[in-house]
Image: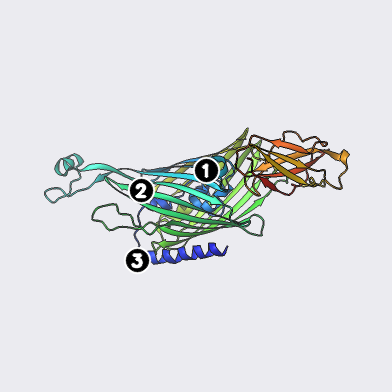
């Protein structure tokens, strides 16, 4: 934790030196756009909320929450004939065959502004509004503008209470036939507090010591550099009983300090989401508001800071599909419509409910060639006639999400299970539970690990 605080302090100090050197003009302002329809509907207060593939953009420190392959896509039809497309993928590193802990993600963002007229002074020194005549005189033409971002992210659980991550990205900005490239990095941390359901997130966005050199003869410009701080509180079972764990209320609040440009006001963003189930379909209405100080939103009226949206998700035999929509008004400028699709591949594993039964007394592992034999002994203080059998669970990271290996419990008179095939050299983590005649499971046994040959 001490090293993390030192790192963040150094970044903050050098970022302020950088901002002081280069005035208030920035390149690639689209880096401040909110990607994903879910965060957009929540007022873009997402620094501490994000728990899926979108973390690569919002807070790479929490990308580690992705424990199955995930894919996300979003289309945004913005005001002023501006649109952008967002695509992201994330995989646990172990599922990619890498002998490291954590999650890896790739993010792309494409921004396009419809063609605009390249204005030039006519040969006689006047300006013409007759485009055809103007084109004949000065060779005027229409050219597009836009930009792109490509990034790769890595996140890991640095300690029990917090995770850390970074996104290294390359940013492109194009106007007519001129374009520029610049590398940058996002650094994020997500901390779980001692208060259940309360999380805190911190992100430094667009950290770089280079400038965008795009148009010949024009001054170079730095990227928009932000420090974001977010909190969220997740309250489960707001209206329903404990039997419906997907009933959940989320409150989020983000503060954004603009390091570059330095003259921007401090921003606050807040959002709400309530999720509930109807016939195995999850519904999530959302509402948010962006308090953006004295910037352009204030001149467009109070409704320009409002955001709203909803999401629908369902599990289809091991594949979770979520469809999200967000509506964001910008007053006289128009509206922004954002549609997103998120796919999570992998059957969620229910956590065994702790009951009176005790876990197996001793659990041992015997690694073999591309296999591991798990053995255990019967638990103490549990009568043999009350045991239905044993379930074995496995994970590819310590304390991670366990996958159930036994379709039916191992018989109570058998105290072993051979797990194969496994990848040689990749460490595996196991726990075992006792299953009672009432089909309820004990808590997990002590986690142990081994590496197959």
Residue 95, how many percent across, how many down? 57, 40
Residue 352 in view here: no
Task: Look at discs 2 and 1 and give the one toward the viewer.
Answer: 1
Ranked by sequence position, the earlier of labels 1 and 3 is: 3
Circle 2 Cα neighbour tier, 10 Å, few/some/many (<14 / 14–19 / ≥20): many
Identify the residue position indicated by label 3 in the image. Answer: 21
Identify the residue position indicated by label 1 in the image. Answer: 90
Residue 142, how many percent across, how many down? 25, 42
C-alpha span from label 2 to label 1: 22 Å
Which residue: 78% across, 43% down? 376
Ranked by sequence position, the earlier of labels 2 and 3 is: 3
Up the image or down, 55 lies above or below 18; here it is above
Identify the residue position indicated by label 2 in the image. Answer: 172
Label 2 SS = strand
Residue 15, how many percent across, how many down? 42, 63
51 lies left or right of 117: right
382 lies left or right of 246: right
Place residue 17 in its image quadrant.
bottom left
Circles 2 and 1: CB distance less than 8 Å? no
Which residue: 43% across, 44% down? 108
Ranked by sequence position, the earlier of labels 2 and 1 is: 1
Task: Look at discs 1 and 3 and give the one toward the viewer.
Answer: 1
Label 1 SS = strand
Near-viewer residue (355 or 74)? 355
C-alpha span from label 2 to label 3: 23 Å
Up the image or down, 303 lies above or below 316; here it is below
Label 3 SS = helix
Place residue 360 in its image quadrant.
top right
């Amino acid at each position: 934790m001490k090293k993390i605080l030192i790192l963040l302090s150094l970044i903050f100090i050098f970022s302020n030196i950088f901002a002081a050197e280069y005035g208030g003009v920035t390149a690639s302002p689209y880096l401040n756009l909110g990607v994903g329809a879910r965060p957009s509907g929540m007022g873009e207060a997402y620094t501490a909320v994000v728990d899926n593939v979108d973390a690569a953009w919002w807070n790479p420190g929490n990308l580690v929450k992705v424990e199955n392959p995930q894919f996300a896509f979003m289309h945004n039809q913005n005001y002023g004939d501006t649109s952008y497309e967002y695509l992201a993928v994330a995989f646990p590193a172990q599922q990619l065959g890498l002998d490291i802990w954590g999650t890896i993600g790739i993010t792309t963002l494409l921004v396009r502004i419809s063609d605009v007229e390249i204005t030039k002074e006519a040969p006689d020194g006047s300006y013409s509004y007759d485009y055809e005549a103007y084109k004949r005189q000065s060779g005027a033409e229409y050219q597009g503008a836009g930009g792109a971002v490509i990034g790769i992210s890595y996140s890991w659980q640095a300690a029990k209470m917090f995770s850390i991550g970074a996104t290294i990205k390359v940013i492109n900005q194009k106007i007519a036939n001129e374009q520029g490239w610049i590398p940058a990095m996002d650094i994020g941390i997500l901390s779980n507090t001692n208060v259940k359901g309360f999380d805190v997130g911190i992100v430094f966005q667009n950290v770089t010591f280079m400038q965008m050199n795009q148009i010949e003869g024009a001054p170079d410009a730095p990227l928009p550099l932000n420090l974001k701080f977010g909190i969220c509180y997740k309250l489960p079972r707001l209206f329903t009983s404990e039997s419906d764990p997907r009933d959940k209320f989320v409150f989020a609040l983000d503060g954004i300090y603009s390091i570059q440009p330095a003259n921007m006001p401090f921003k606050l963003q807040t959002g709400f989401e309530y999720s509930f189930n109807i016939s195995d379909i999850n519904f999530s209405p959302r509402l948010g508001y962006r308090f953006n100080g004295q910037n352009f939103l204030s001149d467009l009226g109070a409704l320009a800071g409002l955001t709203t949206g909803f999401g629908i998700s369902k599990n289809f035999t091991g594949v979770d599909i979520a469809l999200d929509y967000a509506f964001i008004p910008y007053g006289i400028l128009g509206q922004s419509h954002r549609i997103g699709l998120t796919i999570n591949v992998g059957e969620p594993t229910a956590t065994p409910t702790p009951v009176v039964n005790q876990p197996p007394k001793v659990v041992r592992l015997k690694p073999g060639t591309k296999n591991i034999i798990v053995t255990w002994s019967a638990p103490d203080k549990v009568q043999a006639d009350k045991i239905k059998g044993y379930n074995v669970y496995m994970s590819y990271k310590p304390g991670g999400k366990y996958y159930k290996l036994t379709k039916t419990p191992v018989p109570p008179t058998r105290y072993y299970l051979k797990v194969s095939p496994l990848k040689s050299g990749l460490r595996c983590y196991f726990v075992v539970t006792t299953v009672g005649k009432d089909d309820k499971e004990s808590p997990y046994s002590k986690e142990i690990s081994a590496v197959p040959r």
